[in-house]
Amino acid sequence: MLEMNVPWWEFVVRGVVVYLFLLVFLRLAGKRQTGQYEPFDLVLLLILSNAVQNSMNAGDNSLLGGLISAATLMLCHAVLVRLSFYSPTLARLVDGKARVLIHQGQIDQALMRRELLTPEDLEAALRAGGCLHAHEVERATVETNGQITVVLKRRG
């Protein structure tokens, strides 16, 4: 149970490589994949976790190896969060930048294409923001986490 087939440092190296790979892959996949989970997005994440499992543990299913891998991933995440806090440039690379989707009722179609947002995604965000039509919107923003925030025009 505690005897490992692979040296401890190999778990660490493999964990760091897999963490960085998935970070870059998911960042390049776009905000929709990280902020608005559809059933097929969740399936992808589950399959990804299974796909990288063997690359992280090198066939070693020991308890200690699993704990080292988990600790490595948590440490990578903690280090990245801390570095992102102190480095706005790194934070922008990791998290991206909020983008204006609707300004004064005008929809940025190019941004919708880049973010892979469907008209149905936009309609759902507008409903969640308390309106039904883009012309009612002062500003809608695709946040860094993929959520769309809506600010309505003043009525009156």
Image (cartoon, rainbow, N blue to C red):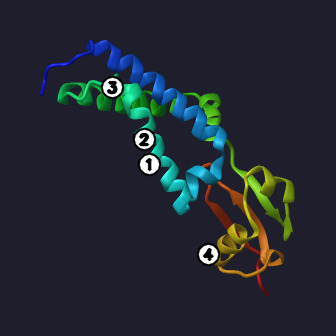
Q: Secondary structure at mark 2?
A: helix
Amino acid type, label 1? Leu
> Circle 3 sits in a helix, a strand or a loop, which is it?
helix
Q: Crowding at label 1, few (<14), some or many (≥20) Cα neighbours within 10 Å?
A: few
Which residue is disc 3 drawn over?
Answer: 57
- Binning the other alpha carbons within 10 Å of mark 3 as few (below 14), some (14 to 19) or many (20 upward) gives many
Q: Which is more foreground, mark 4 or mark 2?
A: 2
Q: Nearer the viewer, residue 20 or 130?
A: 20
The residue carrying mark 4 is: 128
Kindly check if marks 3 and 2 are in contact, taking CB atoms under 8 A apart as contact.
no
Is 8 above or below relative to 80? above
Residue that protrudes farthest toward the bottom in the picture? 156
Q: Name which residue type carries label 2.
A: Ser
Q: Dots 4 and 2: beta carbons under 8 Å?
A: no
The residue lying at 43 percent from left, 23 percent from top is 16
Q: Earlier in the sequence, mark 3 or mark 4?
A: 3
Could you tell which of marks 3 and 2 lies nearer the N-terminus? 2
Q: Residue 64 at what x, y percent from top left? A: 19, 26
Spatial CA span between label 4 and label 2: 31 Å
Check contact, mark 2 vs mark 1: CB within 8 A.
yes
Left or right: 59 as drawn, with respect to 121: left
**Image quadrant for the C terminus?**
bottom right
Task: Kindly identify the amino acid type of the residue bearing the numbered disc 3.
Answer: Asn
